């Protein structure tokens, strides 16, 4: 059994084992609970669309997290990068009404640049001063939330916008729907293409080799002439750019404006998605759909079976802890 299969087995055991125990403690039948989960995630076309929408929202930051993790860096700041990417897309999209063939690429690029700039900050601190990127990215999440709130309610407030959101994007800046009447847009296809491209880059390019070498054997990579500081900076910037692109797709595809509450924690859940996918972009696609099922079906669990919403959060947290701990133990054994 390979590493990815073992990680998936760990996730299945945690989800069904711990989830069942939590439901029993809440006096709910696990059969009813998991039945409601699958029914809420795949029962109708609209529910399937919502599951894929949630998967898309997780896939972008998860791919971003995977880039940093592959370089041996722990990017815990995808939430802030996603948020600022969404703000940049929402503000520019509402401020510059343009034809669709210009507006959509522009707002997506704005989101990627904003997220990339925010990700580059801890990358620079790591490269220049050896700062711990875990602490830096965690703190920058808070700063990003406060900064976005300040900008959207202060100097960059747009006329007619609410207290914590930008103006409405013109229809030309909306991503095309894949299923009319749902939130599923072409962002799903864009995320899939990005996953395949990223896998090719990691497996077939010199940059991908340097990234993996810096993460797997940093001392050997340094002796081979790889600039670890530059690699850290570029990896964190790209990681943030992909997460920021995800925030832009939420704004242009679902909300059609930026709102400070656009993410219920996608950037944090994405850590679990990336770990479950063993940092392989294609397996991350599978993991994002599984977690998308938890996100969309969790509502049905609560409504139909009376399962406390905290059960889903508990399972997600345990997945993160178990897989992160497993990677730490494995890295120490290699060292």
Image (cartoon, helix red, strand yellow):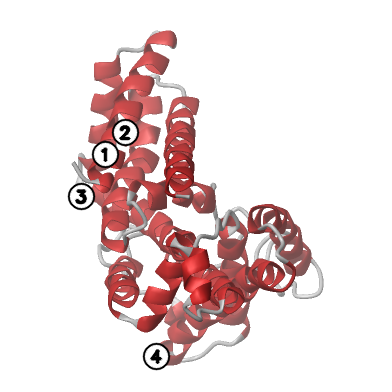
Question: Looking at this view, is 61 or 7 the one in front?
Answer: 7
On residue 45, the disc is 3
Mark 2, residue position: 10
Mark 4, residue position: 101
Q: Secondary structure at mark 1?
A: helix
- Which residue lies at the image location 78% right of the left edge and 64% below the top edge? 150
Q: Residues within 10 Å of mark 3 (few under 14, many from 20)?
A: few
| CA distance for labels 1 and 2 | 6 Å
On residue 6, the disc is 1
Answer yes or no: is residue 90 visible: no
Quadrant in which the N terminus appears: top left
Mark 3 or mark 4, which has the lower sequence index?
A: 3
Q: Position of residue 215 (x, y in %)?
A: 47, 63
Question: Looking at this view, is 172 or 1 the one in front?
Answer: 1
- Which residue lies at the image location 26% right of the left edge and 39% below the top edge? 6
Mark 4 or mark 2, which has the lower sequence index?
A: 2
| CA distance for labels 4 and 2 | 44 Å
Q: Position of residue 140 (x, y in %)?
A: 70, 59
Q: Secondary structure at mark 2?
A: helix
Residues at circles 3 and 2 in contact by the CB criterion of under 8 Å:
no
């Amino acid at each position: 059994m390979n590493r990815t299969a073992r990680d998936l087995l760990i996730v299945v055991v945690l989800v069904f084992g711990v989830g069942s125990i939590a439901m029993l403690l809440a006096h709910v039948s696990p059969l009813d609970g998991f039945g409601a989960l699958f029914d809420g995630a795949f029962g109708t076309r609209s529910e399937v669309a919502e599951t894929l929408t949630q998967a898309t929202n997780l896939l972008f930051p998860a791919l971003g997290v995977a880039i940093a993790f592959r370089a041996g860096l722990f990017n815990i700041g995808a939430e802030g990068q996603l948020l600022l990417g969404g703000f940049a897309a929402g503000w520019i999209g509402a401020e510059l009404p343009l034809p669709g063939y210009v507006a959509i690429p522009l707002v997506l690029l704005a989101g990627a640049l904003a997220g990339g700039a925010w990700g580059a900050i801890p990358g620079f601190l790591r490269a220049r001063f050896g700062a711990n990127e875990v602490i830096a990215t965690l703190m920058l999440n808070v700063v990003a939330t406060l900064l976005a709130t300040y900008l959207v309610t202060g100097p960059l407030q747009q006329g007619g916008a609410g207290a914590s959101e930008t103006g409405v994007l013109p229809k030309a800046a909306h991503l095309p729907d894949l299923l009319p009447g749902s939130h599923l847009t072409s962002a799903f296809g864009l995320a899939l293409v990005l996953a395949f491209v990223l896998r090719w880059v990691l497996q077939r390019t010199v940059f991908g080799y340097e990234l993996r070498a810096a993460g797997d054997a940093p001392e050997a990579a340094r002796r081979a002439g790889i600039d670890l500081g530059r690699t850290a900076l570029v990896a964190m910037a790209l990681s943030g750019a992909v997460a920021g692109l995800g925030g832009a797709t939420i704004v242009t595809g679902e909300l059609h404006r930026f709102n400070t509450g656009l993410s219920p924690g996608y950037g944090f859940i994405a850590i679990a998605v990336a770990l479950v996918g063993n940092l392989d972009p294609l397996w991350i696609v599978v993991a994002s759909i599984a977690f998308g099922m938890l996100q969309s079906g969790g509502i049905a669990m609560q409504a139909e079976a009376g399962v406390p919403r905290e059960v889903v959060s508990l399972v997600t947290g345990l997945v993160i802890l178990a897989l992160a701990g497993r990677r730490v133990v494995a890295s120490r054994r290699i060292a």
